[in-house]
């Protein structure tokens, strides 16, 4: 039976889940930010409320996996398929320069090699809606930014996985254990696409295009999520990568997935995912940031986080883009939120980041999710039309 403290905490969190979206809309901030700030008020930084039991960490972890599954679903393989070989090479060069600058920044900040991967992240979940709102999502520039964000998400997660494997096992046979999973993932991509082609009625049922009181699509998606998380555990990979791969598989097999995405968003962002961000806020210790030395470090971290995205964007000049578009790209790609917080959590879990550094990264995420889209819109001026 639940004790009174646990009941009050559960009631408080449940009420917060109801009212925070309205508060976010009122102040025109992302709901994720309000959820983290609510967690900050509840947690170590302000009220220091004790949460008894394992219900919050469990729901937060499940929300975390759903968040990464949705991130995988956001990859648009149609965009990837339209890229020429030259464009793919350009995007890989862009990411290589980003990660090289991130490595240099990590050395200067004396934060360890793992910080290289943390600074290389971006937020596809912020990039995509910002481009749609500005009317640039279908333009050459918008497609280039989407491609860069997609590669940053996928390659960073891949890098985190193999870096942790290297730290734990070195270049032994255990380091190569994930490769059968990747090969199997590639085979499933092809088989799934063929199955959807030959069984359109079943595919439409999964996508919600046919009336279905059993919600087969949602059940299938959740089963796919846990399947890949389980396979990742067997291969000694981060579960977050398995969740991301499961979402990517769904995105590749079912291209017209808007209805299914809406249902999963209702399940994830309507309930489970907010628990993750509230839990992140509760673990955040503001005193770690407000100390004079740490505050200066966080400012440096923010400047480097901007620089590692803006400087590679100058490569766009070689594609005939204008200087204004270079800064638009750099500002928007510097937006970080979900993935950088996930990377920080993984880093602390594996002893690669300190709690102080994790708090600085969470603070960076809160600032950059405002700063990136805002600077992008300011650099766009009043132009809302599609550009080529």
Image: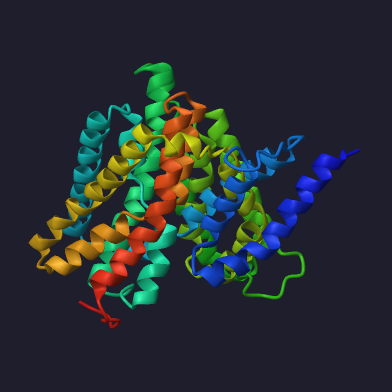
Image height check: is 1 above or below 378?
above
Give x and y (percent) for residue 31: 55, 61
- Residue 102 lies in what quarter of the image? top left
- What is the quadrant of the N terminus in the image? top right
Q: Residue furthest right?
A: 1
- Residue 348 x/y as whole percent: 48, 29
Q: Is residue 288 left or right of residue 233?
A: left
Residue situated in front as seen by the camera: 203 or 268? 268
Q: Residue 328 is drawn in which quadrant?
A: bottom left
Could you tell me residue 141's position as x and y percent? 23, 69
Question: Residue at the location (56% across, 35% down)?
Answer: 231
313 or 170, which lies in front? 313
Examine the rendered structure and indicate whether residue 296 appears above or below residue 311. above
Q: Quadrant of the C terminus?
A: bottom left
Residue positioned 62% across, 74% down in the render: 209
Of residues 357 and 148, the one nearer the viewer is 357
Image location (x, y in percent) of residue 80: 32, 60
**Side of 366 where 37 appears, left or right:** right
Looking at the image, can residue 113 be seen?
Answer: yes
Q: Is residue 180 visible?
A: no
Query: What's the residue at 74%, 55% (across, down)?
Result: 14
Tell me how many marks there are: 0
Q: Is residue 224 left or right of residue 353?
A: right
Q: Residue furthest front?
A: 292
**Relative horizontal placement of residue 195, taking residue 112 as reference (left or right):** right
The colour scheme is rainbow
């Amino acid at each position: 039976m639940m004790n009174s403290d646990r009941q009050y905490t559960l009631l408080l969190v449940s009420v917060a889940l109801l009212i925070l979206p309205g508060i976010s809309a009122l102040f025109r901030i992302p709901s994720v930010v309000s959820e983290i700030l609510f967690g900050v008020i509840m947690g170590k930084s302000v009220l220091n409320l004790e949460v008894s039991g394992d219900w919050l960490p469990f729901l937060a972890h499940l929300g975390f996996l759903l968040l990464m599954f949705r991130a995988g679903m956001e990859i648009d393989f149609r965009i990837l398929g339209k890229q020429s070989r030259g464009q793919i090479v350009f995007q890989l060069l862009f990411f290589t320069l980003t990660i090289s600058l991130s490595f240099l920044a990590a050395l200067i900040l004396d934060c360890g090699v793992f910080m290289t991967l943390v600074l290389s992240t971006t937020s596809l979940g912020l990039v995509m809606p910002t481009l749609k709102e500005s009317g640039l999502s279908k333009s050459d520039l918008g497609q280039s930014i989407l491609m860069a964000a997609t590669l940053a998400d996928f390659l960073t997660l891949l890098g985190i996985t193999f870096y942790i494997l290297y730290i734990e096992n070195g270049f032994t046979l255990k380091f190569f254990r994930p490769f059968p999973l990747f090969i199997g993932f590639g085979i499933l991509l092809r088989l799934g696409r063929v199955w959807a082609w030959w069984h359109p009625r079943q595919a439409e049922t999964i996508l919600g295009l046919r009336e279905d009181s059993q919600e087969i699509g949602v059940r299938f998606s959740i089963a796919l999520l846990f399947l890949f998380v389980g396979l990742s555990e067997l291969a000694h990979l981060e579960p977050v990568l398995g969740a991301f791969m499961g979402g990517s598989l769904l995105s590749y097999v079912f291209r017209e997935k808007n209805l299914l995405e809406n249902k999963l968003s209702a399940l994830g962002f309507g309930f489970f995912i907010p628990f993750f961000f509230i839990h992140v806020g509760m673990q955040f210790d503001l005193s770690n940031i407000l100390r004079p030395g740490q505050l200066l470090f966080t400012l440096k971290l923010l400047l480097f986080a901007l620089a590692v995205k803006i400087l590679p964007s100058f490569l766009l000049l070689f594609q005939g883009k204008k200087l204004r578009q270079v800064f638009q790209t750099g500002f928007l790609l510097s937006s970080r939120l979900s993935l950088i917080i996930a990377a920080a959590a993984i880093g602390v879990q594996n002893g690669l980041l300190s709690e102080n550094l994790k708090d600085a990264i969470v603070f960076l995420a809160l600032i950059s999710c405002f700063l990136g889209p805002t600077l992008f819109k300011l650099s766009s001026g009043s132009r809302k039309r599609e550009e080529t």
